[in-house]
Amino acid sequence: NLADRLQETFKKIRGKGKVSEADVKQMTREVRLALLEADVNFKVVKDFINRIKERAVGQEVLKSLTPGQQVIKVVQEELTTLMGGEQSKLHMSNKPPTVVMLVGLQGAGKTTTTGKLANYIRKQQNKKPLLAACDIYRPAAIKQLQTLGSQLDMPVFAMGDKESPVEIAKQAVAKAKEDHNDIVFIDTAGRLHVDDALMEELENIKEATQPDEIILVVDAMTGQDAVNVAESFNERLGLTGVVMTKLDGDTRGGAALSVKAVTGTPIKFVGMGEKLDALEPFHPERMASRILGMGDVLTLIEKAQATVDEEKAKEMEKKMRTMSFTFDDFLEQLSQVRNMGPLDEILGMMPGANKIKGMKNLKIDDKQIGHIEAIIRSMTPAEKTDPDIINASRKKRIANGSGTSIQEVNRLLKQFKDMKKMMKQMMGMTKGKKKKNPFN
Ligand code: GDP
Ligand code: MG
């Protein structure tokens, strides 16, 4: 499915310390295919990929501490924007009753969603809904709504199947006013396909009741068709929101990605089952994260951003460049990254780190960090700035003071030396046009 494919793609780019245009190209090609296969609208995919490309090779990524993950973050943000950005709530009229009209094809889930929405709004906002039965064509449609009403212990306004749906809707609103219901849900009829007679009837109901919300109910299982249906309904009625049902089923989910981009109408809720509480507000950001399976990555980036504050990072970089990096700095860095997660991963996030030969030897076991800190703390200020003065007797003193062994002290000194060497290499790489080294 879409999530699996994208996650596979991102595994490759995730740990990259440097992201080249070729990397981005490769990544976007795979994302593009994954989206198309998931039934996302072709034009939507094209625009989306262009935006990703633009941003992924831009400054915000190249300059970041973690380009590989930054690229993924860009995709996540663009996915979120694609689905409408913010979560869209049901709009409440400040002159009750709020009128919500539900429209859609037959079997999409209008009647069920009418019950779910009413249930939700009563629970969340303490509103008193009235349900209006305006599907007079489908046999037992009125009965179906009445059954839902009694399950929910909610009033249902019905006038049988002899009155016109427009008249029923109009009277339902009047009844709600009279009974002080703050919100009326109008359950309308559907057809198997979009047709003119249906649209005309819906337009008339709209005209007669001036709804605050016209919600299209679409079945996620119908894929691209759901988006086409949304476009047709939007043209005729001017939708204010979409509820996408049956996302609990085995759908490819692509429709959820395209609806907003194609129609300009946000998905407000999703149906996750047949039960009356199986309705969830639609959060674009969470949906994007779920699709990318990247809750963990986002958290890591957030952690990194929160932990390594920018000023400090800059200062550190300068020290690295001028090679005035001392054991004190090392200690500070250690304590900064310590609560960020596994050290390998953090090292992997360092710019250019994976290109450095000998990087593997620098791998520091998480459990060793405590020892390392103890060793550094046992050094004198002079030793910390100039480790070269640490001779055999000093090593012995440090090992004793930190409760470690001379071997461990030696290992750390070696690692520190290697690290400085690595920094030198790295700075040379990131600076690019470094003075030519006559010994190379
Ligand atoms: P309507 O013709 O648009 O009014 O559709 P209904 O509300 O009668 O629903 C048609 C069928 O879809 C019913 O069997 C519902 O139980 C089912 N249904 C509606 N929403 C969902 C959903 O979110 N998930 C699942 N699995 N089934 C749903
Ligand atoms: Mg129905």
Image (cartoon, grey):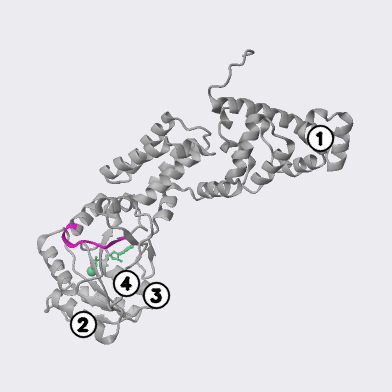
Q: Disc 4 or 1, which lies upstream in sequence?
A: 4
Q: Could you tell me how far apart the alpha carbons at marks 3 and 4 are, in whole angstroms?
A: 10 Å
Q: Disc 3 or 1, which lies upstream in sequence?
A: 3
Residue 408 lies, in percent from the top left, at 79, 35
Structural crowding at the residue carrying mark 4, measured as other residues with C-alpha within 10 Å and reported as few (<14), some (14–19) or many (≥20) = some
Q: Is residue 237 magenta?
A: yes
Q: Disc 3 or 4, which lies upstream in sequence?
A: 4
Contact, mark 3 vs mark 4 (Cβ under 8 Å): yes
Q: Which residue is mark 2?
A: 174
Q: Which residue is mark 3?
A: 125
Q: Which mark is residue 92?
A: 4
- Where does the magenta region start and end? 235-244
Structural crowding at the residue carrying mark 1, measured as other residues with C-alpha within 10 Å and reported as few (<14), some (14–19) or many (≥20) = few
Q: Disc 2 or 3, which lies upstream in sequence?
A: 3
Amino acid under disc 2: Ala
Q: Which residue is mark 1?
A: 382
Instruction: From the image, state whether disc 3 or disc 4 is nearer to you.
Output: 4
Q: Could you tell me how far apart the alpha carbons at marks 4 and 2 are, in whole angstroms?
A: 17 Å
Q: 168 and 5: which one is in front? A: 168
